[in-house]
Every structure is written in C-alpha cells, then in structure tokens.
Image (cartoon, grey):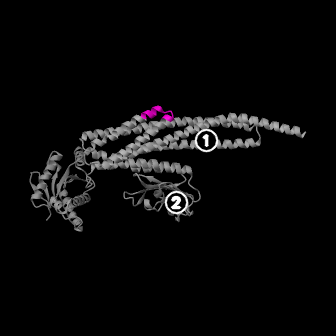
C-alpha cells in the first residue's frame, strides 16, 4: 500500500515536473526573447549616451571657437599657434567621437543615419580645418565666408545628431514595447503553470513574476527619464538668457524632485565666491533645510571631487561639514557638481528629511537637469561674450566706433537730437614716451572708467581711436553737456590724486546734432572745436557755435 502511494506520489511529481517543464519551456521562450530585446534596448541607450557625449564635444568645440568669430571678422586679434592647436585637438576629438557613433549606429541597423553623420562630420572637420590658413591673415570677406561655412557645418552636425538620436529613441521604444509585450506573454503562461503545480512552484513563479515586474518598472523608468531629458532639452533650447535657464531648472526640480528642497550655487568670475542662482523654496519661506553656507568651489567637497555626493544623515561622521549643525536640525542631502565654463564651478544642493536618503531616481533627475542646464548656460555665456567683444573696445570696455555709429543711426531714425563731445587726452604721446606704453594704457582705462561713471544711463561713451573718445548725449543741449564735461574733468583730477597713474588732462570739443546734417559732419564740427581747445592751452572744453566760431566753456 505504501509502495503504491509512493509510486502515485512519484508519478504525480513526475507529471508535475513534466507539466512544469512544458509550461516552463513555453514561458522561458518569451522571457529569453524579452531579455534579448532588453539587451538591444540597453545597447540603444549606450549609443544614445555616445551621441550625447558627441554633442557635448561639439558644444565644447563651438564654445571654444565662437568667441573668435567676431574678432576674426573685424581682424581685431591674431590667433596664437596654441589656440589653433587646441581647436584642432577639439576637432579631432569630435571627429573620433563621430566615427565611433557612426559605427555604433550601423551596429544598431541605422545605416542611413550613420552615413549621414559621417558626411556631416567630414564637412564640419573640413570647415574647422579651413580656419588654419585664414586666421594668419586674410580679407574680412574670406574670414566671414569661412565663419559662415563653419557655423552651417556645426548646425548640420546638430541636426544630424538630433535626427540620429530621434531615430534611435524610436528604435529603442519599439524594442522596449516588444520586450514588455513578451514579458506580459511570459507572465500569462507562468500564471497558467501556477494553477497546475505545487505550492513550491507557485512561490517560484511568483518570484519570477516579481522579478519581471521589477525589470519592467526599471525599463519604464528609463523611458520616462529619456522622455524628460528630451522635453527639458527642448525647453532649454528656447531659453534666450541665463536667467531663463535658471527659471526652467527651478520648474524642473519642483516637478521631478518635489520632496526635496533644491538650490543652485554658482561661482563668480573669479571663482572665489558662490552666489545662489535658484531655490525651490516658496517666496518668503526660509530655506529651512537648504541655504548651504559654503562660500567658494574650493571649499565644497562635491566640486573638489567632481562627482555627486550623498549623505543619508547629517549626523554621519563622514557627512559634509556644511550640512552639519544647521539651525533647522538634522537632514539628508545630495550635492551634484556642475561645470559651466569647462571646469567645475557650481553645485546643485538638494536636502530632505533626516534619515531619508535621496533616492537613486531623484539623484538621476538632479544630475540630468544640472548637466543639460549647464551645457545650455555655457553656450549662452559664450554667445554673450562673443557679442560683447564684437561691440566693445577690448582695452577700455567702452563701445567701439562701429557700435557708436549704429547707436547714432538709431537716434536719427527716432528723430532725437543729441550733443556730441569729442575728447582727446592732452600730451598723450609725451606720457607714453616718458612713462611707457603700460602707463599709457592705464591712463586710457582710468579715463574710460571716469567717463562711464560721469554720464547718464542712456548716454553713449566710445573709444573713437587711439587716445580719442566720443560721448553722445541724447536729448541734451550743449549747455548741459558742457557742465557734464566740466564735472568729468574735475572728477578725473580727483581720481588722479591717488598717484597710481601719471597725471594727465583732457580737452573736449562739443557740438550739437543740429550743427550738421550727418553724424560725420557733427563729428567734424566737434573735432574743429577740439582743435581750438588744444590751441587755446588744452585742459578745457570748447563749444562749437552755429556760426562756426567756438566758445571756451572751461571754468577757470
């Protein structure tokens, strides 16, 4: 009897094993297929990262060469051999990265995208190489054409990489959907097996199902992060100013890590001090957990180490000193360093309740947001610097002659009158010969500073050439302008008492826009008055009268 029961048990066991094996075979097949799909998806994600790194390389190269474009067009600077070599090195990095991405795209079956990327990369590399023969000396037309070709090639590279990333995301989405579908099919088969096997098999199937769900959740989270990264990048591309970028970052943090209080600290131009650029604290609400007291990048552990630091509790012995002992009490924190100028110069500081560590998902969103925003801010700063260099005189920081003429042209279109002062440093050649050109440059910079501080916000100050300066005072009569110039000369005399710059004086010729029909004519009238001031003993202001005579406006 016992033997018969035992045989039945073994028979039932064998049958259960056969059933399990049969259903297992049916269930393993879609799971293996899902695993293969998942591997393809992960491969696509890796290629997407390569594309992101290539775009970063492109941005780094464009950020490096962009400041020289305006200077090239104006023939204002000569590029050194080291700068050419650096540009060539960055271009080689871009070319190598593009070739690697093209190979990866072919392995993913995106042959057309790979071929398009290779063609665009070759054109871009050729456009960069074209600068070498022209920067040594060429006509402005040739330089402008070279700049235009490079800019177009760069834009084409951006378009091609975006298209490749879009096609790759579409492919990865299809792989993801296939993987999810196969996982769902495998789960259904395993559920049928659960109803036919023992409790042990039921437990095993439950474990397999839970593992599949975890994988599915992880895959979906990856897709959500990709969708967020794409949306946030699109928003940043529409940001026109650095302030717009910080506003978008604040909104992004409020949506993705709502349970954390986030702030961003960015170093000033000297990298000696941090200043807060954003905070998710509500208006009027104190920075209860935030408000990091670190003063500079060299003091911040995260910026020094160059990677994200997480602290589950500020009570830990290895917690950052700047999260310990805050008046608000103990807390948890995560610090993400950011690079805005090619080196780590900022930090995103997120805090939460004590003992509740910032999760890996929250950290990923902090890092994605900080990285994308930092790339956009770096580009905005580069463009702003390039525009400033094209508009201003490099020695004094005042407007250059072309910018001045453009502004006066606007005044003419607006029908506004103005007073024009033509100034010249007295005996500047003697100052240069006696004290050296460095002293001369210091004198020009000092006078430019006094000039800028002496005018109204809407007035225009420009270096016209050499030691000559022009002031345009919109909606101002010559009498008022003469008083402004006298106060300027008095302030210059006071400033020179420090002894840091050899003493000098300045003479002005003053004219009105009604004295001539054109801007050049007004300048000529003021220049004639300036010549009279020089001949009359210098260190004075001479006002040109409509009749062609001059009035010495110097206050004795």
The spot of residue 301 in percent (x, y) is 48, 59
Left/right of residue 16 with respect to residue 57 in the rendered view: right
Q: Earlier in the sequence, mark 1 or mark 2?
A: 1
> Would you identify the image quadrant in which residue 412 lies?
top left
Tell me the chief SS of the magenta region: helix
Circle nearer the viewer, 1 or 2? 1
- Residue 76, given in percent of the width and then of the height, sits at 25, 48
- Magenta part of the chain: 106-116
Q: Is residue 286 left or right of residue 122?
A: right
Quadrant, the N terminus? top right
Total tally of numbered discs in the picture: 2
Was residue 10 drawn as part of the magenta stretch in this picture?
no
Q: Which disc, if any, is residue 349?
A: none
The x and y percentages for residue 220 are 57, 42
- From the image, tell me which residue sits under label 1: 216
Relative to 412, residue 555 above or below: below
At a point 21% along the width and 62% down the height, the residue shown is 487
Asked whether, in this view, residue 38 is left or right of residue 187, the answer is left
Residue denoted by label 2:
289
For the point 70% across and 36% down, the residue is 24
Q: Quadrant of residue 59?
A: top left
Report the quarter where the C terminus lies: bottom left
Camera sees residue 260: yes
Q: Residues within 10 Å of mark 1 (few under 14, many from 20)?
A: some
State the residue at coordinates (16%, 49%).
522
């Amino acid at each position: 009897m016992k033997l018969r029961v035992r045989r039945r048990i073994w028979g039932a066991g064998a049958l259960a094993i056969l059933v399990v094996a049969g259903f297992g075979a049916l269930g393993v097949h879609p799971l293996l297929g899902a695993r293969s799909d998942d591997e393809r998806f992960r491969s696509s994600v890796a290629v997407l990262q390569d594309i992101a790194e290539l775009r970063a390389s492109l941005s780094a190269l464009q950020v490096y060469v962009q400041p020289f474009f305006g200077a090239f067009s104006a023939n204002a600077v000569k590029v050194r051999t080291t700068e050419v070599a650096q540009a060539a090195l960055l271009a080689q990095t871009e070319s190598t990265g593009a070739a690697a991405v093209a190979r990866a795209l072919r392995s993913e079956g995106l042959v057309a995208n790979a071929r398009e990327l290779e063609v665009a990369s070759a054109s871009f590399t050729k456009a960069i190489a074209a600068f070498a023969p022209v920067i040594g000396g060429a006509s402005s037309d040739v330089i402008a054409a070279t700049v235009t070709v490079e800019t177009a090639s760069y834009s084409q590279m951006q378009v091609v990489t975006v298209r490749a990333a879009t096609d790759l995301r579409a492919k990865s989405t299809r792989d993801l959907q296939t993987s999810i579908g196969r996982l769902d099919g495998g789960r259904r088969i395993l559920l049928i097996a659960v109803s036919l096997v023992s409790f042990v098999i039921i437990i095993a199937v439950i474990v397999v199902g839970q593992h599949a769900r975890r994988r599915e959740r992880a895959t979906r989270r990856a897709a959500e992060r990709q969708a967020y990264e794409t949306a946030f990048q699109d928003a940043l591309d529409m940001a026109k100013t650095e302030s717009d970028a910080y506003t978008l970052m604040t909104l992004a943090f409020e949506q993705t890590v709502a349970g954390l209080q986030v702030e961003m600290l960015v170093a000033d131009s000297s990298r000696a001090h941090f200043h807060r650029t954003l905070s998710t604290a509500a208006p009027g609400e104190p920075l209860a957990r935030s408000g990091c007291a670190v003063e500079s990048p060299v003091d911040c552990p995260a910026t020094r180490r160059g990677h994200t630091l997480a602290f589950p509790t500020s009570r830990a012995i290895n917690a950052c000193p700047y999260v310990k002992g805050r008046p608000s009490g103990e807390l948890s924190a995560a610090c993400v360093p950011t690079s805005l100028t090619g080196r780590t110069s900022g930090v995103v500081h997120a805090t939460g309740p004590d003992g509740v560590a910032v999760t890996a998902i929250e950290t990923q969103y902090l890092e994605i947001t900080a990285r994308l925003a930092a790339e956009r801010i770096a580009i905005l700063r580069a463009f702003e610097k390039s525009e400033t260099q094209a508009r201003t005189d490099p020695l004094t920081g005042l407007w250059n002659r072309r910018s001045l003429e453009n502004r006066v042209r606007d005044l003419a279109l607006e029908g506004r009158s103005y007073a024009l002062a033509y100034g010249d440093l007295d005996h500047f050649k003697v100052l240069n010969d006696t004290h050296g050109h460095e002293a001369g440059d210091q004198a020009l910079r000092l006078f430019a500073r006094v000039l800028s501080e002496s005018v109204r916000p809407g007035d225009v100050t420009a270096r016209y050439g050499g030691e000559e300066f022009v002031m345009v005072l919109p909606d101002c009569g010559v009498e008022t302008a003469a008083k402004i110039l006298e106060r300027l000369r008095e302030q210059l005399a006071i400033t020179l008492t420090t002894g840091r710059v050899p003493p000098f004086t300045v003479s002005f010729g003053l004219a009105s826009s009604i004295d001539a029909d054109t801007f050049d004519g007004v300048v000529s009238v003021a220049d004639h008055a300036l010549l009279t001031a020089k001949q009359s003993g210098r260190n004075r202001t001479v006002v040109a009268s409509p009749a062609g005579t001059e009035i010495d406006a110097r206050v004795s």
